[in-house]
Image: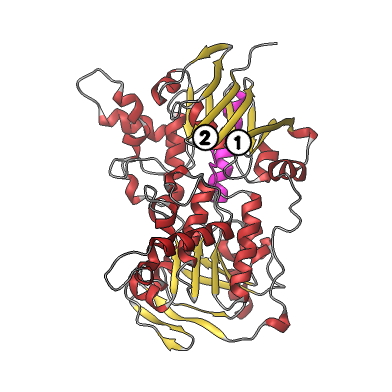
Amino acid sequence: MAEPVLSIHGVTKHFGAVKALTDVDFTLERGEVHALCGENGAGKSTLMNIIAGVLQPTEGEIRVDGKTVRVASPAIAQSLGIGLVHQEIALCPDATVAENMFMASTNRRRAPFMSYRALERDAQVVMNRLASIDVRRKVAELPISKQQLVEIAKALTLDCRVLILDEPTAALTETEAQQLFSIIRDLKAHGISIIYISHRMAEIFALCDRVTVFRDGRYVCTERIADVTPDDVVRRMVGREITQLYPEKLCADDASGEKILEVDGIGDNERFHDVSFDLRKGEILGIGGLIGSGRTEIAEGICGLLPRSAGEIRLHGKVQPIRTYADAAKAGIVYLSEDRKGAGVFLEMSIAQNISVLKLRSLTNRMGLLNRRAEAALAEDFARRLGVRMGGIEAAVTSLSGGNQQKVAIAKQLAVKPKVILMDEPTRGIDVGAKAEIHRLLRELARSGIGIVVISSELPELLGLCDRALVVREGRIAGELGAHEMTEEAVIRLASGLGMTEAADHAA
């Protein structure tokens, strides 16, 4: 048999006292799509960063085509034909799409001049395989979903033999994801080997040939996809049964009808228009729609992160003059951004500092000195409740996995005891076990009287978690679905405009 294109033997990685990986093995055959699964903190991203030269192993061996190699840097990894698409966006926002895509090859050039026309032409050819994005645009002008596509396109320019995709569809629309799947199948047909990291079982079972499971930084097993079920994989990931991903919904007897939040006719004449809805005590209200439909802009308009030109917001019946996010937070309305790295957490600060950052006034004395003991107690409490895997609350957030960073971002919002929380993609990039924990936490918060609004691109989450759902299309509420009306088909029809067309036909 031919040597695997990539093999890992006995790799161990320590970050101080924290053992991220312990004696891990992994093999990748030529021309296969190999899924790597595990809860957040299981060590998946750490291993991928070692393969890609971002991190160095404490112990162990890496072989490429049967030969032992030392991947001392990302440049060496690229010279070996290894490309990594990070879960977190790692682009230069002030550079164009084309410049970002060919940055690695440009840095290796020896010629004194560069043809931007040729650069943009070559970049556009690659980008057109994924989406119709003008490569002359600056990355900062693109939404998160488009930036993710630029990350993938950048990897496709490297002429990889091994391509590592870490949660590649987390920020993509369904159409964009299907385009990516087509490219993955094409790459496989041309002999490219792909490591595919995802928490989405449907994708893994549709795309992959084999699956390897990690748990707590250790290798658990490798199986052929044809020989296992999604439930088998989940059980091996978490080491226990996940009996209920979504908690019980609000019973009719528990619905008080008391309105916590009322949004009446808000708009900015550009991104969202004439938006009205209410949020009732005890319920979780979902907001669905295609990425780019205006869901995030509506939430940001409510919170003062985007200016409004019309409408009003009432909290417990009282009009709130919200012009800035500080106004919203003071009133008791907080927002969890979909962009964890850019707006959710302070990566270089400690876990304790992140969780307490919105509550500093109540943690300081009259002299303006921070009560470190109270800050630590607050952080320990929320880290425990959300199951943050960490070396300690003084560890920097950048040392955590993506999913644990998201838990810290949620804890930061909960620490201020808000009246309403608007959560934009609260479980993006989080494993199935952590999702269940967060879903239960959101239900507990709703039952305690806090208003919960969840924006989600995952239809199973929208339908399984929420008591009602609003569907947004082109910055407007296309329709509302009650508990017994929420189906994937109903959401998709409203999001695509079919539901609105049918309603207009009936009215005529």
Judge from the rendering whether residue 35 lies leftward or rightward of residue 47; answer left or right: right
Q: Residue furthest right?
A: 227
Nearer-the-camera pick, 71 or 15: 15
Nearer-the-camera pick, 106 or 435: 435
- Helix, strand or loop under label 2: helix
What's the CA distance linking mark 2 and mark 1? 9 Å
| Residue 132 visible in the picture | no
Magenta residue check for 178: yes
Where 39 falls versus 451 (above or below)? Answer: above
Judge from the rendering whether residue 424 lies leftward or rightward of residue 504; answer left or right: left
In the rendered image, which quarter contains the N terminus? Answer: top right
In the rendering, at what x and y percent does residue 341 appear?
Answer: 42, 50
Please state which amino acid type lies under the numbered disc 2. Thr
Q: Residue furthest bottom?
A: 317
- Helix, strand or loop under label 1: loop
Residue under label 2: 46
- Binning the other alpha carbons within 10 Å of mark 1 as few (below 14), some (14 to 19) or many (20 upward) gives many
Magenta residue check for 264: no
Judge from the rendering whether residue 208 lies leftward or rightward of residue 93; answer left or right: right
Where 224 falls versus 473 (above or below)? Answer: above
Marks 2 and 1, the one that precedes in the sequence: 2
Nearer-the-camera pick, 277 or 303: 303
In the rendering, at what x and y percent does residue 94 appear?
Answer: 28, 44
Task: Please report the bounds of the magenta region as a residue range.
Answer: 165-190
Which picture quadrant has residue 481? bottom right
Discs 2, 1 touching: Cβ within 8 Å: yes
Where 110 falls versus 329 (above or below)? Answer: above
Judge from the rendering whether residue 180 lies leftward or rightward of residue 297; answer left or right: right
Q: Residue drawn at (48%, 71%), measured in percent from left and top? A: 476
Residue under label 1: 217
Q: Main secondary structure of the magenta part?
A: helix
